[in-house]
């Protein structure tokens, strides 16, 4: 047996290609979302005050009182 030419062609179904592209896009968007969430969490941690309570309204009230006090002193 003598083979002079051998051609092997393979192609994906167009639907499968689109499906894979969508999956890759979703995966990338998910990873980027995780990065953004972490960045936001880090920024919030930097700007939160070290008071023992986690009640935002309480911290805001104390912060505003502090600002008004500082302004009145000037």
Image: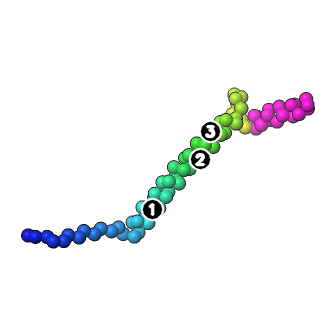
Viewer-proximal residue, 51 or 46? 46
The circle on residue 21 is: 1
Label 2 neighbour load within 10 Å: few <14, some 14-19, many 20+: few
Question: Who's the residue at 70% across and 29% down the image?
Answer: 50
The range drawn in magenta is 57-74
Image coords of residue 31 (percent x, y): 51, 49
Residue 68 forms part of the magenta stretch = yes
Q: Position of residue 7 (x, y in %)?
A: 23, 70
- Residue hosting label 3: 42
Kindly indicate the quadrant of the structure image that contains residue 61. Answer: top right
Disc 2 is placed on an element classified as helix
Magenta span: predominant SS is: helix
Task: Please report whichever mark, 1 or 3, sits nearer to the chain's N-terminal start.
Answer: 1
- The structure residue drawn at horizontal position 83% and vertical position 31%, both measured from the top left corner, is 66
Where residue 20 sits in the image (x, y, percent)? Answer: 42, 61
Q: Which residue is mark 2?
A: 36
Compare marks 1 and 2 and give the one earlier in the sequence.
1
In the rendered image, which quarter contains the C terminus?
A: top right
Task: Using residue 68 as the reference point, say whether residue 58 is left or right of it.
Answer: left
Q: Tell me how many marks there are.
A: 3
At x 59%, y 45%, the residue is: 37
* Residue 9 at x, y percent in the picture: 28, 69
Query: Is residue 54 rendered magenta in the image?
Result: no
Quadrant assignment, res 12: bottom left
Q: Secondary structure at mark 1?
A: helix
Judge from the rendering whether residue 71 lies leftward or rightward of residue 43; answer left or right: right
Q: Earlier in the sequence, mark 2 or mark 3?
A: 2
Residue situated in front as seen by the camera: 4 or 53: 4
**3 sits left or right of 55 in the view:** left
């Amino acid at each position: 047996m003598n083979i002079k030419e051998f051609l092997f062609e393979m192609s994906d179904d167009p639907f499968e290609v689109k499906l894979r592209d969508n999956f890759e896009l979703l995966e990338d968007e998910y990873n980027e979302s995780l990065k953004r969430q972490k960045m936001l969490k880090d920024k919030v941690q930097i700007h939160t005050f070290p008071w023992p309570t986690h009640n935002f309204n309480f911290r805001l009230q104390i912060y505003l009182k502090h600002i008004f006090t500082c302004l009145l002193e000037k």
